[in-house]
Image (cartoon, rainbow, N blue to C red):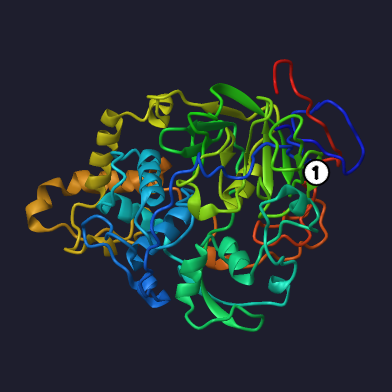
Amino acid sequence: MFPISTTRGLLARLALASAALFLPLAPAGAEIAPDPAAAVAPPKPRALISITRDEIEAAQYDGSDLPPGQSALTAKVQILLDRSGISPGVVDGWRGGMSESAIKAFQRRAGLPMSGRMDHAVWDLLQGYAAAPLTADYTITDEDATGLVDNIPADYAEKAAMRSQGYTSVLEKLAERFHMDEKFLAKLNPGSGFRPGETIHVTVPAKPIRAAVTRIIVDKATRRVAAYDAKGNMVADYPATVGSADTPSPHGKHLVDAVALNPTYTYNPQRNFKQGKNDRVLIVPPGPNGPVGNVWIDLSEPSYGIHGTATPSQLFLNQSHGCVRLTNWDAWELAHMVKAKVTTVEFLDPGTSIADVTGVTPAAAAGRTAMATTLAPTRPPARGVRQPPVLAAAEPAPVPAEAAMTETVAASTAAAVANPGPLVITPETPASAEPLVPQAAPPAAVPEEPEYPSDVGLPDTLPGDPAGSVTLYPQPGQP
């Protein structure tokens, strides 16, 4: 379970400066293949209903909770949550644990009661991310069909013999690019063969967040990972797979030591585990379907890290061997926001929540809810169509029954528009202005980083970071 790099032949104890080094590490045994005995039994297959892009765009909230099962409304809410920086995992239209945990995280950031249920306050705030279309047409390119592999074997010797742990289909590749479940993407495009030249319907995620994350909190009970900046603002929150009772995630506070993009993976039966007849060290090539996905965020606690996964739709169904698994796109986003020797990673003890350690108490949430309610006292019957106060061009005229509170409402609204604070955190640019696929960065002093969606041409280091390789040796007492 120790990241090892052999690509440049250097064997040295990790020594990093304060800047985050995105190094070609090779997580060695940091995660092993899912153990059927340790995983939660998967649910019975669910029948997908027919959902169209027009239904997603037109979906409106009626004042009740999200519909049970799969719906266009849930898909819309998932897209908006994803744009807000609160990841629902995959966009699949299903009301379930990951979506409800995302709503709860959104409520926590907004200072609302953390019910995990849809309500008018959540819907209104989410409209700050709905200015751009939620879906778009995308024409599959020849590049989308390159770099694919036939399958991903379970045997590590077979994995090591491959050129990469790449995507197995265009469908899988594009589903990850647009943060979608494969089956949902296929259902949104009935009859498509997902071949180059075809135009398909996809959801439109926002551009990856770029902020300086100084604190990460892992809530093992709710399976959420929250990222904060130096001012205590929550900039992102992700669903995660964490350790089991037999192979628990660590406790306490640790530091980010390094970050590896597209890491290789070292299987060493002498240090960690033995799979079948594989009794020698094997180097598994990198790829999104590798044991640690396409990102490894190394922690100061030996053998532990935060990384991607080949099965994003199963984050809440599986258990890890102690590490923290995120979707590949969430791990990629987080990797670009942490800083070595600066960003802390805190694993909460049972019974302690993120709200407990960040000061978001029920009393404070109730006060924030009263303020949010005051901002819009005159809502139409189907209140979901209303824009949040910070985006509204003008406030609607008060109805007679509420004339007495006009001055209070006006003052509250003016204050909210002038200084919205964390109540609504809108994207810096509309999602419609962002490219759906990575664009080649023009020559510049500080070239723009490639976005997650493509595995073509990804750098081993970020601009300005020196290339290198390291070996993390086992600590005394470690296996």
* Residue 465 vertical position relative to residue 166 in the rendered view, above or below: above
Whether residue 427 is visible to the viewer of this picture, yes or no, is no
Residue 92 pos. (x, y %)? 43, 62
Give left or right: position of 325 versus 74.
right
Whether residue 99 is visible to the viewer of this picture, yes or no, is yes
Residue at image location 43% in from the left, 54% down from the top: 81
Residue 218 pos. (x, y %)? 50, 33
Give left or right: position of 311 versus 267.
left
* Residue 86 vertical position relative to residue 231 in the rendered view, above or below: below
Residue at the farthest front position: 277
In the picture, the quarter occupied by the N terminus is top right
Frontmost residue, 167 versus 258: 167
Frontmost residue, 421 versus 188: 188
Residue at the farthest top position: 476
* Residue 166 vertical position relative to residue 479 in the rendered view, above or below: below
Residue 149 pos. (x, y %)? 72, 65
Residue at image location 43% in from the left, 25% down from the top: 357
Count of numbered circles in the view? 1
User: What element does badge 1 sit on?
Assistant: strand
Q: Looking at the rendering, which quadrant does residue 54 occupy? A: bottom left
Q: Residues within 10 Å of mark 1 (few under 14, many from 20)?
A: some
- Check disc 1 and give the amino acid type: Leu
* Residue 136 vertical position relative to residue 198 in the rendered view, above or below: above
The residue carrying mark 1 is 282
Q: Looking at the rendering, which quadrant does residue 471 occupy? A: top right
Residue at the farthest left position: 401
Residue at image location 65% in from the left, 49% down from the top: 293
Residue 319 pos. (x, y %)? 51, 40
In the picture, the quarter occupied by the C terminus is top right
Residue at image location 57% in from the left, 49% down from the top: 330
Give left or right: position of 156 versus 233.
right
Q: Looking at the rendering, which quadrant does residue 396 occupy? A: bottom left
